[in-house]
Amino acid sequence: MEVRGIVSKVSSLSAVVMLVSSLLATSVAQAQVVFMQLRDQHISPAFEGWWENADGSYKLFFGYMNANWEQEIDIPIGPDNYFALSAPGVQDDLSEDFYSFASADYGQPTHFYPRRNPFLFTVDVPADFGDQDLVWTLTTRGKVHRAYATLKYDYMIDPQVISTEVGGDYGSLADSLRTNISPELKVEGETRRTIRTGQTLELAAIANDPDNLPASRGNRLPRTQEQLYRPPSSIVAISGPGLRFSWSVYRGPAQQVSFMPEQFKTWTDTRVYSNSPWSPPYQIPEVPADNRWITQVTFDAPGEYVLRGIASDGSMFTYENIYITVVD
């Protein structure tokens, strides 16, 4: 009887252990499930880091994460999309509003594409910026998110860090990328244009990669279905090296703008056949004659638009904005 009692207790204990283990395994499995949300999610601004300019001033890098996979959102400069400068910690309370019309606009976007858009724009601050916080506030669906730009040492970056964060050169960590030079970019014609709705505007951009770094090594296209749909092998999405150029809508309703030829996505859409450098089996196009990209743009609605031309070598980027007034 005593032996049977001991066996019974051991069996009960084993059952409890198995039950707890099962529950823990189920909880872990559920915690690891990540659903692809197409819309109705928030946007979070991001401070990417800083480096020192040659004149002693500093360059602050910003981007954002749109948790949606498909929904694009327009947030005009105002109480839901603004910058504010303050002493450290002043803007930590998300319930407080620091919006001021006079200082809200630091060149941030008002049209937000899906998913991760890293190193999207920069802000130069003076050499005596000190320990101040330059804070970008975005509010979507009633939820406030802030990115705090500071010159703390931990946030100092270089071109290799940028390349690593965007998965440049197939995710390479080569030391040579520390001295990578951004592409040269020049959009021909006036910076500000006026056009009527329905008319076609032709834009010509000339881009070069002065150091040919990282050098193009051809496209590593998947050869089998298993390679095409294989799970990610790195923390960040990766793309190949090579000079490329694309237009995007930086401010204004992108659904009212049509590009011909179609422009590749400048955000990290990793889904297959998504016309994104981070999407397999994307093939980097050949550089056009004279390194001159010609694009026709049509606007379907009047308003003020900012188009952004983006030249990339796969690791570093150069931007140029064109300001368009569209009238009926």
Image: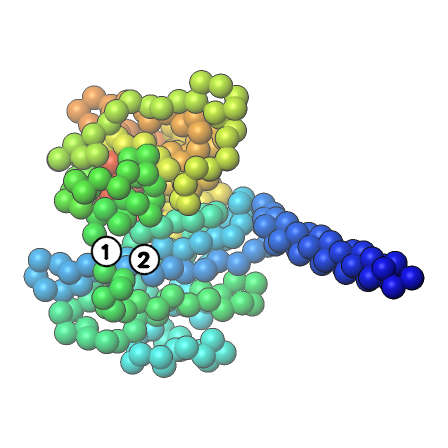
Q: Return the residue nearer the eye: 138 or 128.
A: 128
- Amino acid at dot 1: Ile
When asked about the image quadrant of residue 91, the answer is bottom left
Separation of residues labelled 1 and 2 (CA atoms)? 8 Å
Q: Report whether 4 appears left or right of 29.
A: right
Residue drawn at x 41%, y 77% as measured from the top left: 92
At label 2, counting other C-alpha atoms closer than 10 Å, the crowd grade (few under 14, some 14-19, many 20 or more) is many
- Identity of the residue drawn at 30% across and 45% down: 164
Q: Which residue is mark 1?
A: 157
On the rendered image, what quadrant is the N terminus found in? bottom right
Q: Residue at x 49, y 69 (%)?
A: 144
x and y, in percent, of residue 313 in the image:
25, 36
Colouring rule applied to residues: rainbow
- Please provide percent x and percent y for residue 61: 28, 57
Nearest the camera: 93 or 23? 23
**Quick one: SS at disc 1?**
loop
In the picture provided, is 301 more to the left or to the right than 126?
right
Q: Is residue 238 visible?
A: yes
In the displayed orientation, state which residue is furthest to the left.
55
Instruction: Identify the residue under disc 2.
Output: 48
- Confirm whether residue 12 shows in the render: no
Whether residue 327 sits left or right of residue 30 in the image: it is left
Instruction: Tell me if label 1 and label 2 are in contact, CB under 8 Å.
Output: yes
